[in-house]
Amino acid sequence: MLDKLIENNRIWAEKKTQVDPEFFRRLVNQQSPEYFWIGCSDSRVPANEIVNLDPGEMFVHRNVANLAPPQDANYLSTLQYAVAVLKVKHVLVVGHYGCGGVRTALESDDHGLIDHWLSPVRELAHTHHHELEACSSQTERVDHLCELNVRAQVRNVTLNPITTAAWRAGHDLTVHGWVYSIANGHVTDLGVSISNEDERIAVYGF
């Protein structure tokens, strides 16, 4: 099975160089992405492919349910590298409808360690209990919570000291919230973009 993956890799590399002989040389020489993608680990949501970008054009961090938790060293290190070193111009928080992590957060069963990771999503569901209960089906509830989660993670990114420091240093940086539909391949902008401290204060009050 693994031999098949290596074979696929060789076929892919050959096809890339046939179309663009300089493709890998360019990748070796530089990494200067303008975009930082914070997305879900779901294998059906490949960041670069969704927006039709080549490797090197987007810096990517993925975890279960596309969280941006202020206490997670992995996420924080990646955010700092993206903002302070690569100096990306756009942070894209991208959830997806039907997210398994979000669905799990709505369940009462014990799932072990993942329950700890998903506790922010569960708290979000508790906060928005009434509007989630008003949804007509479990699918609609999950999808609505997916959107609420993206909005919450955008808030986390904008409140992070790394982001604040970049804005205060005059860095051109905007944080966006998107949701991807696996059903049709389309991305929807939730309209929660924040580009500076004044906009953040206007939206969140601090």
Image (cartoon, helix red, strand yellow):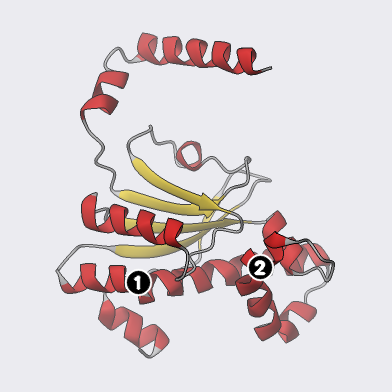
Residue 104 shows in this picture: yes
**N-term mark: 2 or 1:** 2
| Left/right of residue 136 with respect to residue 165 in the rendered view | right
Report, in whole angstroms, how far the alpha carbon at label 2 lies from the one at label 1.
Answer: 29 Å
In the picture, the quarter occupied by the N terminus is: top right
User: Mark 2 against mark 1, which lies toward the viewer?
Assistant: 2
Residue shown at 55%/53% (left/top)? 63
Residue shown at 41%/86% (left/top)? 204
Residue 98 shows in this picture: no
Secondary structure at numbered mark 1: loop
Q: Is residue 130 above or below residue 89?
A: below
Residue 65: percent from left, percent from top: 61, 59
Q: Nearer the viewer, residue 127 or 18?
A: 127
| Left/right of residue 19 with respect to residue 83 in the rendered view | right
Secondary structure at numbered mark 2: helix
Label 2 sits on what residue type? His
Tag 2 residue: 116
Find residue 4 and report its image quarter.
top right
Residue 76: percent from left, percent from top: 39, 61
In the picture, the quarter occupied by the C terminus is: bottom left
Task: List the single residue furthest toward the left.
Answer: 170
Residue shown at 27%/74% (left/top)? 164
Tag 1 residue: 194
Q: Is residue 117 above or below residue 184?
A: below
Label 1 sits on what residue type? Ile
